[in-house]
Image (spheres, grey):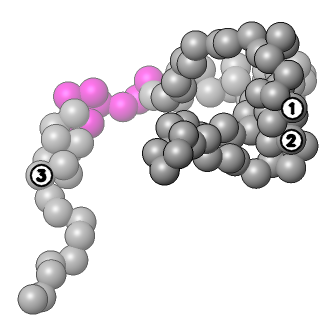
Amino acid sequence: MTTEYISIDISNTPDLLKLAEEVKKTGTPRVLQRADEEIAVLMPMRKAARRPAKRTPTAEDIAAFEAAAGGWKDVDIDRFLSDNARSRQLSSRPSVDL
């Protein structure tokens, strides 16, 4: 879950801009305080995660996909569903001894 923050342009606030550039350069967060009261934390932004480039399917990929078509044609759906429901009622975890 990402959090959306309100952006504030600090281009015309030299002291804050200098502090923000220092935080970005060092990667070290800073606590902003007034007298003895901590007001905010100035932190460097995390780099966005890069998504891997989409891979174009090869001829082998397409052949494997097409070979899988009809792979479930011999399955008895009613029996599959009942077996599946029954298996969900069984516990696969070992009992706990206290």
Residue 14 lies in quadrant: top right
Nearer the camera: disc 3 or disc 2: 2
Report the Cα–Cα distance between label 1 and label 3: 62 Å
Place of residue 57 in the rendered image (x, y in percent of width and height, measured from the top left) = 84, 21
Return the disc, 1 or 3, that comes first in the chain's sequence.
1
Residue 70: % across, % down: 53, 21
In the image, which disc is placed on residue 22?
Answer: 2
Residue topped by disc 3: 89
Q: Is residue 96 above or below residue 67?
A: below
Counting from the top left corner in percent of width and height, residue 81 is at 22, 33
Q: What residue type is labelled 1?
A: Lys
**Which one is in front, 84 or 2?**
2
Q: Give the range drawn in magenta.
A: 73-80
Asked if the residues shown at circle 3 and circle 2 are in contact, with their CB atoms under 8 angstroms apart, the answer is no
In the picture, the quarter occupied by the C terminus is bottom left
Q: Residue 9 carries which label?
A: none
Q: Would residue 46 be visible to someone looking at this image?
A: no
For label 2, the SS is helix
In the image, what residue occupies the spot 86% across and 49% down?
Answer: 26
Whole-number angstrom distance, CA of label 3 to CA of label 2:
58 Å
Observer able to see residue 26:
yes
Q: In this view, does 61 lie above or below 9?
A: below
Nearer the observer: mark 2 or 1; the answer is: 1
The numbered mark, 3 or 2, whose residue comes first in the sequence reads 2
Crowd class of label 2 (few under 14; some 14 to 19; many from 20; radius 10 Å): some
| Proximity of marks 2 and 1: CB atoms separated by less than 8 Å | yes
User: Which label belongs to residue 18?
Assistant: 1
